[in-house]
Amino acid sequence: MNDYLQNATLRQMAKMLNLPLPIPPVLKRNSDAYSDHELITKKIVITGKENEFLHELQKEFHSKISAATIYDASIDGLIVSCIEMESIEALEDLYTTVKNVVNKIAGNGRVVIISRIDDSSALSYTVQRSIDGFSRALSKEIGGKKGIAVNLLKITNENIMPDEAARAAFFFLSDKSSFITGQVIELNNSFGSSFSSPVKLLQDKIAIVTGSARGIGASAARVLHREGAKVILIDVPAAKQDAEQLAQELHADVILEDITDIKAAADIQQYVINNYKGLDILVNNAGITRDKTIAKMSIDQWRSVLNVNLKAAINLTEIFIEKGFNKHAKVVGLSSISGIAGNVGQTNYSLSKAGMLAYMHAVAKKNPDLFANAVAPGFIETKMTETLPFFVREGGRRLSTFKQGGLPEDVAELIGFLCSPLSDGINGQCIRVCGGSMIGA
């Protein structure tokens, strides 16, 4: 799905007429299964403050990338380690490194900055936290014309090792993270599964995706299946045709049930227990909108959104916490930038999505054997957004750093990452898939 402003003829006309159109870059995406060679053709520089962490990080990527230096004419990626930068003067290394290579980063390039919170003094804490602002500003500064993504991995747990940082960086350097930029992602978790190769990341895992007959849910189911998971599709009976067609494609199971039904969670739990050893992945994707300003919103519109988007997800997650989750299971909840920034006419929807974000954080905190994270899409090109008024739709697209909307597969790839061992350092977090949207930034 190409943005109409990416049309070559239109771009040429705009140039001839000197029209200041916000021409979006063409983003490169990779929908193939993960492999050991995911990054092997990418020329990536790994640099930063000289210390053991940097050397171990370079070792982790030694056989996974095409190593480059800051003297190369063009590079595809840059990792800058800011570990142990403890003074204002030390931040000049970050400035100098980025300044010297920023114009060499090719289109669809990637920048991953790694920091580590050090609260041994007010100064060292301040220095490391200041890097958050640098990374967000850099993402907006260099991303718009060439589709370059900039993200920060911030280590907040002293037990996080370079190999765990490298796993997360692997995703953010790949073409599976095209629409994710300007994010500050905490690496706060030091337990996880054994990991040797990104091939078939989810082999033999049992996964549930709610609201999976179409849209983002269907895309997520495809990604999980692609990586080796056995997927159980859950949707309402009215979506039977789409659900069964997708199930045939993915060799998936189907449960047609309204998740707001009082017995739905127990039915789904029993199905998993009866047919499988337990559940490894739960993606709480099902959601609806019933948009009205609060003065015009009926109680049914209020309740229906909260019941589907939040209450049903909580009920389903809680019943598997009681019985059914395998050790170190992964839970992903679909939030939204509306839950972060709010939106006119969406008090019900924004509340439910803020609630989902909070619930994932709480589940991670209260259940040490679980991973729980939220995904917050921005403007995504779906059948639902096609019905929006033209200027509302255009605003959603052009407010992003990349000057365009995302695709359902952009959200699905992040879900796949958060369900895999690559994300074992991340728990209780919310990551936006918004192309660096100004909304809620």
Image (tube, rainbow, N blue to C red):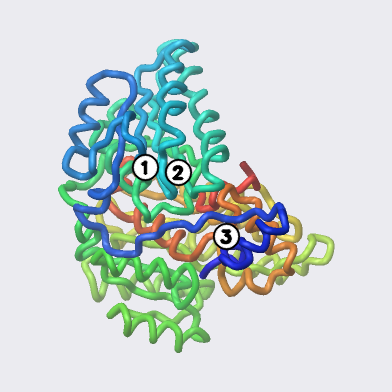
In the shown orientation, is residue 148 left or right of residue 252?
A: right
Observer-nearest residue: 65 or 215?
65
> Three-letter amino acid code at disc 1?
Ile
User: Which circle, 1 or 3, is nearer the viewer?
Assistant: 3
Instruction: Using the numbered discs, state the Cα–Cα distance from disc 3 to disc 2 in whole angstroms.
Output: 23 Å
Give the residue displayed 64% in from the left and 68% down from the top: 289
> Three-letter amino acid code at disc 2?
Gln
Q: Secondary structure at mark 2?
A: loop
First in sequence, mark 1 or 3: give its number.
Answer: 3
> Three-letter amino acid code at disc 3?
Gly
Q: Residues within 10 Å of mark 2 (few under 14, many from 20)?
A: many
Q: Secondary structure at mark 1?
A: loop
Q: Residues within 10 Å of mark 3 (few under 14, many from 20)?
A: many
Observer-nearest residue: 23 or 277?
23
Indicate the position of residue 176 as horizontal and vertical percent values.
37, 56
Q: Quadrant of residue 252?
A: bottom left
Tell which residue pokes out farthest to the right in this image: 295
The reply to whether dot 3 and dot 2 touch (C-beta < 8 Å) is no
In the shown orientation, is residue 22 left or right of residue 370?
A: right
| Residue on which the image places disc 2 | 429
Examine the rendered structure and indicate whether residue 326 appears above or below residue 185: below
- The numbered disc on residue 426 is 1
The reply to whether dot 1 and dot 2 touch (C-beta < 8 Å) is yes
Indicate the position of residue 401 as horizontal and vertical percent values.
58, 47
In the shown orientation, is residue 430 left or right of residue 59?
A: right
Q: Is residue 308 visible?
A: no
Instruction: Using the numbered discs, state the Cα–Cα distance from disc 1 to disc 2 in whole angstroms.
Output: 7 Å
In the shown orientation, is residue 343 left or right of residue 133?
A: right
User: Which circle, 3 or 2, is nearer the viewer?
Assistant: 3
Q: Residues within 10 Å of mark 1 (few under 14, many from 20)?
A: many
- The numbered disc on residue 405 is 3
